Image (tube, rainbow, N blue to C red):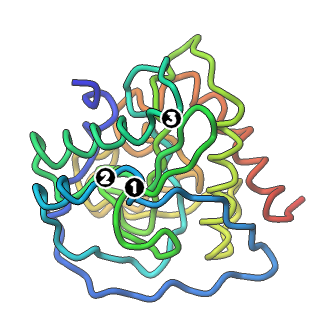
Amino acid sequence: MALVMCAAGVDRTGAHPARPPVAARPAVAAHAAARPVIVPRSRWLDAATVRAHPQPAPRYDDRVVAIFVHHTDSPNGYDCADAPRIIRYLYAGQTGARNWDDIGYNFLVDRCGTIYEGRAGGVDRPVTGAHAQGFNHRTAGVAAIGTFTAGTEVPRAMTEAIAALAAWKLGLAGVDPRAAVQLVSSNSLSRFHEGTAAVLPTVAGHNDGFMTSCPGAALTARLPEIRELAARLQGRR
């Protein structure tokens, strides 16, 4: 139930043909940013859960040229030490009742600014996610754990972590977090008919590509600040 608002725009990954693994491109030195600390999947995904939900091999794109920011539409008043349990719950909901092959988000960020690896495949590789209906290819999904509707406080530690992650991930392809990028919609359930070339921000809200309130009005309002900080972290002016 907690996933309804934001997960409505997620493709089932099985709907797309498998692609062979593609090596990530090397970092572009001029605009590379430091990789932030990322907690691995092993911290929230136990062996018993993996056995209950066997997964196919990850799929990859050639690079990541945009980030979609989400919220998980779950309670905000959690202890950050409980974030692994919350992520495990989200994973169980998506791989169980929804029958997806893995958690849809590539990364998740808690209110204390801790970044967690989400979808399997390697954090430094362009893993094809299942987070943005029509725009999963060449993008990464970052989910803020909580609900950030209008009037909700968005923790600074969380926005700073999202900016650091965007700076690093987009920097691998030399992409400016303040720029726009052309992406082709693969699904008419997005805001754009299948095959449409849409121009979207390189750090976008889920609602830029799908008809949803995700990532919430409060977090959406912080996206310009996140873009600017990410650009500074890349050494841009």
Eye-nearest disc, 3 or 2: 3
What secondary structure is marked by label 1?
loop
Question: Which circle marks residue 104 in the picture?
Answer: 2
Give the Cα distance between marks 3 and 1. Answer: 17 Å
Q: Which residue is mark 3?
A: 81
Q: Residue at x 63, y 59 (%)?
A: 37
Q: Residues within 10 Å of mark 3 (few under 14, many from 20)?
A: few
Of marks 3 and 1, which one's residue comes earlier in the chain? 3
Label 2 vs 1, first from the N-terminus: 2
Nearest the eye: 102 or 52 = 52
Q: Secondary structure at mark 2?
A: loop
Q: Where in the figure is residue 165, as x and y percent of width and height? A: 62, 56
The amino acid pointed to by label 1 is: Gly
Could you tell me how far apart the alpha carbons at marks 3 and 2 are, in whole angstroms? 22 Å
Residue type, numbered disc 2: Gly
Mark 2–mark 1 Cα distance, whole angstroms, equals 8 Å
Which of the 4 quarters of the picture holds residue 41?
bottom left
Residue farthest along the right direction in this orientation = 237
Q: Quadrant of residue 26?
A: bottom right
